[in-house]
């Protein structure tokens, strides 16, 4: 009897360990980052405030979670470049970049924060988050030393999830998907008024 219970508990535990909470068609699980958090700029100075997901419910959300390394930042660079030119930049969707500082090389955190600050100045509507202890990596069970892209609709349901580099076709289809959900969201808001 005890052996049977142990086997069941082991199966349940292993299922939990290997479960993937970032799954298309499911709601993205909540995440709270209190150690550092969202980067804020005030007169050129950097400050932080706790950040949590979901943020601004009711908006299409593009979340990029990556290791704070040069190689991880390059993985989604083609997507970010096209997102900056092919999607409206007028607050119709929310873009969040989360850097996992727990994976940064020793001594590079100042440089990483400097890059984040430059990005925030270039894209003031984008949300930039510093995850000092890797809370998102463990909460969402993402791959280490990688970059993940998550797109949720206005209800917080995952519509796209990819870890690693995207092909040109994946980039284009994901941008089309984001535009589709932005248009749906806009139409729903218009119908409410």
Image: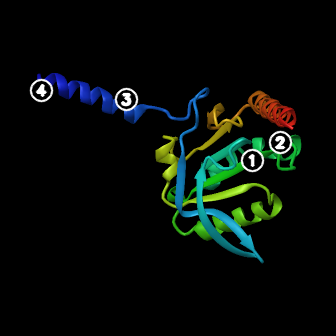
- Crowding near pointer 3: few (<14 within 10 Å), some, many (20+)? few
Q: CA distance from mark 4 to mark 2?
A: 57 Å
Q: Earlier in the sequence, mark 3 or mark 2?
A: 3
Q: Secondary structure at mark 3?
A: helix
Q: Which residue is mark 2?
A: 82
From the image, state whether disc 3 or disc 1 is nearer to you: 1
From the image, state whether disc 2 or disc 1 is nearer to you: 1
Which residue is at a point 48% across and 58% down the rendered structure image? 133
Q: Earlier in the sequence, mark 4 or mark 3?
A: 4
Q: Which residue is mark 3?
A: 15
- Crowding near pointer 2: few (<14 within 10 Å), some, many (20+)? few
Residue 23: x percent and y percent? 56, 30
Q: Secondary structure at mark 2?
A: helix
Q: Earlier in the sequence, mark 2 or mark 1?
A: 2
Q: Which residue is mark 1?
A: 94
Which residue is at a point 33% across and 31% down the rendered structure image? 14
Q: Label for residue 2?
A: 4
């Amino acid at each position: 009897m005890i052996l049977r219970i142990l086997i069941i508990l082991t199966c349940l535990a292993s299922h939990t360990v290997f479960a993937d909470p970032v799954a298309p068609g499911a709601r993205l699980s909540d995440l709270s980052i209190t150690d550092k958090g969202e980067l804020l700029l005030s007169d050129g100075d950097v400050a932080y405030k706790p950040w949590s997901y979901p943020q601004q419910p009711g908006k299409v959300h593009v979340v990029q979670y990556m290791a704070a390394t040069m190689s991880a930042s390059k993985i989604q660079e083609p997507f970010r470049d096209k997102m900056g030119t092919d999607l409206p930049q007028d607050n119709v969707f929310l873009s969040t970049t989360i850097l996992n500082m727990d994976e940064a090389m020793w001594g590079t955190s100042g440089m990483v924060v400097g890059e984040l600050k430059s990005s925030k100045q270039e894209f003031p509507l984008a949300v930039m988050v510093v995850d000092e202890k890797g809370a998102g990596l463990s909460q969402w069970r993402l791959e280490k030393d990688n970059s993940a892209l998550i797109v949720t609709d206005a209800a917080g349901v995952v519509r796209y999830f990819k870890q690693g580099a995207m092909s040109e076709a994946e980039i284009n289809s994901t941008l089309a998907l984001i535009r589709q959900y932005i248009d749906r969201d806009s139409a729903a808001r218009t119908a409410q008024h």
